[in-house]
Amino acid sequence: MMKTAMDDRIFQILVHIALALLAFVTFYPFWNALVVSFNEGMDTTLGGITFWPRKFTFENYGYVLKDSRILTGFGISIARTISGTLLTIAGTAIFAYGMSRKELIGRRYYMIFAIITLYFGGGLIPTYILIRGLGMFNTFWVYIIPSIISVWSMIIFRTFFREIPAGLEDAARIDGCGYWGTFLRVVLPLSGPVVATLALFTAIAHWNDWFVASIYINNEHLIPVQTLLKRTIDSNISRELVSDSAAASFVAKTQTYTTKSLIMATMMVTTFPIIIVYPFLQRFFVKGVLVGSLKE
């Protein structure tokens, strides 16, 4: 008995050590990027910046936030994330509610067609031709309309809706509610956890996406911040972020900025908003995803 208790304690200690190491390995790259972003760029090139800035400065962030394209990109990213999340969750929830109704004629075939899209796509070139043919090329709507329905989210929504007691919907029908009334007044209010979880997943996907703009957008005023960050990384950041001659001469004199320090500062600026949102919705994750996927 004593040996068993000792073995369990040793096992728990080893598990905690392993989890601590995993947490450190996961968190340290982000922490190091934060440290580098607050350190003078030229000093960073000397190496040795690990856990704390050696020469603390806000100047990296000063240059990043002075760039008008960063501010414009933030506006586009925020507008895209909010509108895209609202429309995607609304469209997907409506689709899922219809698919959860047994009286829907052809429900099985609609489900088969939807699932096929999870495994097969037309490819980049046909999609590009389609987007251009629909007139969404170089418009804000190219961020929203193609992703307004998520089949993966629809499956989770549908499973959750099917677990809602039928008596609640029957009571709503007796009170005079139709399908829309039942959905808006009964089903949707009961779906808070799954709505919050899928909304956060959708918001993160919209916020982090850089690929769509790199393919379908040429207008500099419609470039989101993540695409701008990707372009900055791929190009000479000194020319990208320091565009006017006065700033360029200042950089040449002070030698405090480097490509790496400005990239890290830009990365922190683009990552910060979604990090702020995450803790408020984290408590819905386990409940929302598990409740929506327990039974099929």
Image: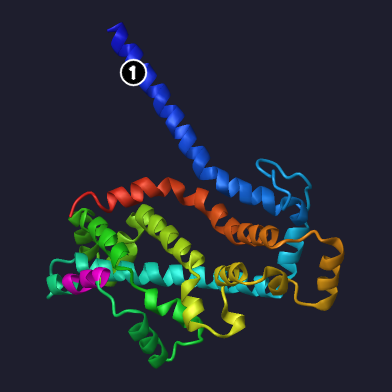
**Residue 241 x/y as whole percent:** 71, 71
Q: Is residue 251 left or right of residue 187?
A: right
**Residue 25 x/y as whole percent:** 50, 41
Residue 113 colored in magenta in the image: yes
- Magenta part, dominant SS: helix
**Residue 115 x/y as whole percent:** 22, 69
Q: Is residue 5 left or right of residue 168?
A: right
Residue range corresponding to the magenta coloring = 111-119
Q: Which residue is mark 1?
A: 8
Q: Is residue 220 left or right of residue 205?
A: right
**Residue 84 x/y as whole percent:** 45, 71
Residue at horizontal 51 percent and vertical 72 percent from the top: 80
Q: Amino acid at mark 1?
A: Asp
Quadrant location of the N terminus in the rendered image: top left
Quadrant location of the C terminus in the rendered image: bottom left
Residue at horizontal 82 percent and vertical 66 percent from the top: 251
**Residue closest to the eye, 176 or 250:** 250
Q: Is residue 224 above or below residue 49?
A: below
**Residue closest to the eye, 275 or 236:** 236
Badge 1 crowding class, 10 Å Cα cut-off, few under 14, some 14 to 19, many 20 or more, is: few
Residue 94 colored in magenta in the image: no
> Total number of numbered labels?
1
